[in-house]
Image (cartoon, grey):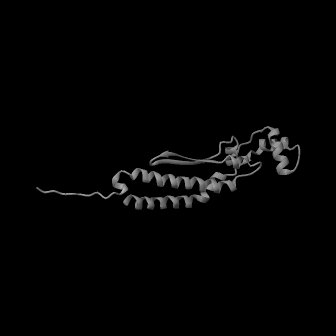
Amino acid sequence: MLEIELNVPPIPLLDGRAAAVVADELQAATEYAVNLAVGTILPLTPIDRGMLRGGMQTEVFGERTEIMGRVFNPLEYALPVETGAQAHFPPPDALEGWGRRKLGQEGLGYVLARAISKRGTKGAFMLKRGLEACRGRIVQRFEEALQRLKDRLAG
């Protein structure tokens, strides 16, 4: 009788822990990415009363190998500040406070609304510029996570 005994080493790749190891590394890299992104975006975000900066949020969700992260701002005016707005006539009352705080003058609401109705507004592109600024470090972090995954899975 021929008998072969094979001892499988207790490494994550072979003992059923691989998915948990992958999820752990992906979760950590994704959390790093969204936190780095928001930290880069905030200083680029226009500030008036601080609500736009204060509204910036991050979220990491999913499980196993399908982990996603996002940076977002749920405030209604966040998208027009990011991308700009086409010409439209906004409510003058909504611009009164901005004119007082930024330009130091009262009664500019109608004048500002009329200017926006002719030219629209330019975008700040804080999310786009922030992500571009930190993209290299995010890619590097995921490359490091891949190397750690190789090391951890091999035991």
Residue 94, quarter of picture: top right
Residue 108, quarter of picture: top right
User: Image point 74% across, 44% down: which residue?
Assistant: 120
Q: Is residue 56 left or right of residue 6?
A: right
Image quarter hosting the C terminus = bottom left
Image quarter hosting the N terminus = bottom left
User: Image point 36% across, 50% down: which residue?
Assistant: 16
Whole-percent x, y for residue 46 in the image: 73, 52
**Camera-side residue of 8 and 126:** 8
Q: Residue furthest left?
A: 1
How many marks do you count on the picture?
A: 0
**Camera-side residue of 72 and 80:** 72
Decide: is 107 above or below 36. above
**Camera-side residue of 82 and 36:** 36
Is residue 85 at least partly visible in the picture? yes
Whole-percent x, y for residue 69 in the image: 55, 49
Is residue 129 at least partly visible in the picture? no
Q: Is residue 11 left or right of residue 34?
A: left
Whole-percent x, y for residue 58 in the image: 60, 48
User: Image point 47% across, 55% down: which residue?
Assistant: 25
Q: Residue furthest right?
A: 106
**Camera-side residue of 103 and 23:** 23
User: Image point 44% across, 62% down: which residue?
Assistant: 147
